[in-house]
Image (cartoon, helix red, strand yellow):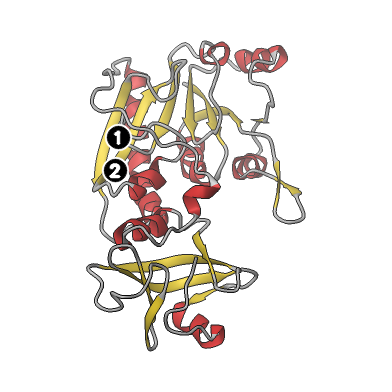
Amino acid sequence: MKIIFFGTPLIALPYLDFLHKNENIVASISQPDKPKGRGQKIEEVPVKSFCKEKNFPIFQPANLKEPSFLSEISNLKAEIGMVVAYGKIIPKELINIFPLGLFNIHFSLLPHLRGAAPIQWALLLGDRVSGVTIFQIGESLDTGHILAQKKIEIEEKDDAISLEKKLIPLGIQLLEEALAALKKGTPETKVQTGAITLAPCLKKENYKIHWEKSSIEISRQVRALIHNGAYCNLPNGKILKILKADPIFPAIEGDEALPGAMTSFERGKGFIVKCGIGSLRILELKEEGKKAQDAWSFLQGARLKINEKFF
């Protein structure tokens, strides 16, 4: 069975590697390379680098409806397409090329958390359960019939990195089972049922810490956004990204302090910041223009005073 893979970032690579080793994958489709960093240097997307290393075709169309591109894909005679974090809505002109269907591996229990950032939103919302869904792609976003689905528990200390590490092998196991059913011609699909929730692309405002919120909410934000870092500003205005923090609820001290104020420190560990409800123990962080470090080391050079405010 010939397969075409759609994917772009690092999280797609384990699935592409599995298909490359175990199935007849005839090509991959990724988003175009984009400028990155301060220098805006064009950088290859991870899936493209993998394909070049393994020496099989990679397409990076700017327009998925381009007739010449559609003709090339059609000529490959693939029975199915498999999508993992491709990053664009796929038009019906491309969907219809695959006689057995185009399928997406999605990191939530659909219809909960439809959209581009389900792992992050599961943590932001405080979900206790996550999972992987393989569904057949239609014309609407993440609405197709479910081919396979499995769930796992989200642990209290999970962040986006640790949750990804749990979901990736679960998804590969699910992919193996789904492909076996498709090869036998016995796939059983079901309509999505239950409450529909959304997981839209994250915006800059999602990363900004508002100390008026509870310590539990801010802790979730830190864990969900660890890849790029939830941030606040130091008293001098510099950006401070919080990488690891624990909620203290209710606050054990500093009840008279305003949200955002440093109320105390713990020698060798970090420092405590007052929140709207409770407090947050800051353990790891990254100051603007510097490397990530533990909060205690940062405090030695920062010369912050008790009751000084982050904002």
Instruction: Depth check: give the residue in front, 68 or 280.
Output: 280
Q: Mark 1 points at which residue?
A: 109
Instruction: Depth check: give the residue in front, 219 or 84.
Output: 219
| Residue at image coords 34%, 37% | 108
- Kind of residue sitting beneath label 1: Leu
| Residue at image coords 39%, 52% | 165
x and y percent of residue 177 in the render? 31, 31
Quarter residue 58 falls in: top right
| Residue at image coords 31%, 75% | 256
Q: Is residue 188 visible?
A: no
Using the image, determine if residue 119 lies above or below residue 88.
below
- Kind of residue sitting beneath label 2: Ser
Q: How many labels does the image show?
A: 2
x and y percent of residue 213 in the render? 35, 57
Q: Mark 2 points at which residue?
A: 130
Crowding around mark 1 (Cα neighbors within 10 Å: few <14, some 14 to 19, many 20+) is many
Question: Going by the image, does 164 lie left or right of 289?
Answer: left
Crowding around mark 2 (Cα neighbors within 10 Å: few <14, some 14 to 19, many 20+) is many
Disc 1, SS: loop
Question: Going by the image, does 138 lie left or right of 281?
Answer: right
Question: Going by the image, does 263 lie left or right of 99?
Answer: left
Using the image, determine if residue 164 lies above or below residue 82.
below
User: Are the two marked residues, 2 and 1, in contact with CB atoms closer than 8 angstroms?
Assistant: yes
Q: Which of marks 2 and 1 is nearer the N terminus?
A: 1
Instruction: Depth check: give the residue in front, 288 or 114.
Output: 288
